[in-house]
Image: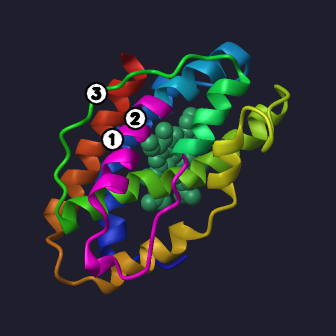
């Protein structure tokens, strides 16, 4: 894959944050670990997705929409008999550049989801039980179209996009530690 300069910068500037998050999540080798992961990812993403659904999409996104997984996570929690976490709304900027940065984290996580889905199949989880959200992400095709959006946009301030991506990784890390 040929990476655009902004994608490369995003990747490099968030590599440490990604590694930190991976360490927090750890290996999903038993159901207890997966349950912690599911509660953490729900606490991180659900408020962001709800806020976006409420506020609508800036016209600059055209008809493009990200892969939303809130309802699939809801059903996964129910499958496993887990209560819904009650996270607070994170304070993330909402302008176009910031949204591109937050989207980098949400959309990019679909790459890791493919790997996680393979691992948790061994725990008896699948697209119709417990791992619905991972399956949605693993089969989504919005990562590539997100990267095209990123490439085409020459108006968003790259530093603002990168700052928002790191801020979003920090929100995720808090969700996994709380
Ligand atoms: C144990 C948990 C995780 C594992 C094992 C993992 C693994 C991976 C892998 C294998 C990739 C693909 C790298 C490549 O193709 O070069 C990736 C990419 C990515 N992951 Fe994760 N990931 C995990 C958790 C997360 C979480 C929770 C998030 C966000 C909340 C996240 C965000 C991203 C992003 C943004 C990318 C895209 C990097 C790029 O620009 O290519 N990951 N991850």
Nearest to N terminus: mark 2 or mark 1: 2
Q: Which element is circle 1 on?
A: helix
Residue 82 in which image quadrant: top right
Position of residue 97 relative to residue 47, above or below, is below
Q: Quadrant of the C terminus?
A: top left
Which residue is more in the foreground, 20 or 59? Answer: 59
Q: Residue at coordinates 18% horizontally, 39% vertically from top-left?
A: 91
Disc 2 packing (10 Å; few <14; some 14–19; many ≥20): many
- Place of residue 96 in the rendered image (x, y in percent of width and height, measured from the top left): 21, 68
- Does 111 appear in magenta? no
- Of 95 and 57, which appears nearest the observer? 57
Tell me the element at label 3. loop
Q: Position of residue 61 (x, y in %)?
A: 34, 77
Q: CA distance from mark 2 to mark 1?
A: 9 Å
**Does the residue tagged 1 have its C-beta within 8 Å of any atom of ligand 1?**
yes
Rendering coords of residue 11 (x, y %): 37, 58
Residue that badge 2 annotates:
44
**Residue occupying image coordinates x 36% and y 29%:** 173
Q: Earlier in the sequence, mark 1 or mark 3?
A: 3
Ligand 1 within 8 angstroms of badge 2 C-beta: yes
Q: Residue at x 18, y 53 (%)?
A: 163
State the quadrant of the N terminus: bottom right
Q: How many marks?
A: 3
Give the magenta range: 42-69
Q: Secondary structure at mark 2?
A: helix
* Pointers 2 and 1 in contact (C-beta within 8 Å): no
Q: Which residue has dot 1 on it?
A: 169
Which of these two is toward me, 82 or 8?
Answer: 82
Label drawn at residue 88: 3
In the rendered structure, which disc, 3 or 2, sits on the residue that comes first in sequence? Answer: 2
């Amino acid at each position: 894959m040929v990476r655009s300069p902004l994608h490369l910068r995003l990747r490099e500037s968030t590599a440490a944050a990604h590694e930190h998050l991976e360490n927090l999540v750890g290996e999903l080798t038993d159901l207890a670990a997966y349950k912690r992961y599911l509660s953490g990812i729900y606490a991180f993403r659900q408020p962001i997705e709800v806020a976006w659904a409420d506020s609508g999409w800036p016209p600059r996104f055209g008809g493009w929409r990200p892969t939303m997984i809130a309802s699939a996570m809801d059903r996964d929690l129910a499958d496993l008999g887990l209560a819904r976490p009650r996270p607070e709304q994170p304070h993330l900027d909402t302008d176009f550049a910031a949204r591109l940065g937050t989207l980098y984290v949400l959309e990019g996580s679909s790459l890791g989801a493919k790997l996680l889905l393979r691992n948790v199949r061994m725990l008896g989880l699948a697209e119709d039980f417990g791992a619905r959200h991972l399956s949605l992400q693993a089969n989504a095709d919005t990562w590539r179209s997100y990267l095209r959006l990123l490439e085409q946009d020459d108006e968003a301030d790259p530093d603002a996009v990168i700052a928002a991506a790191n801020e979003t990784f920090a929100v995720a890390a808090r969700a996994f530690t709380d």
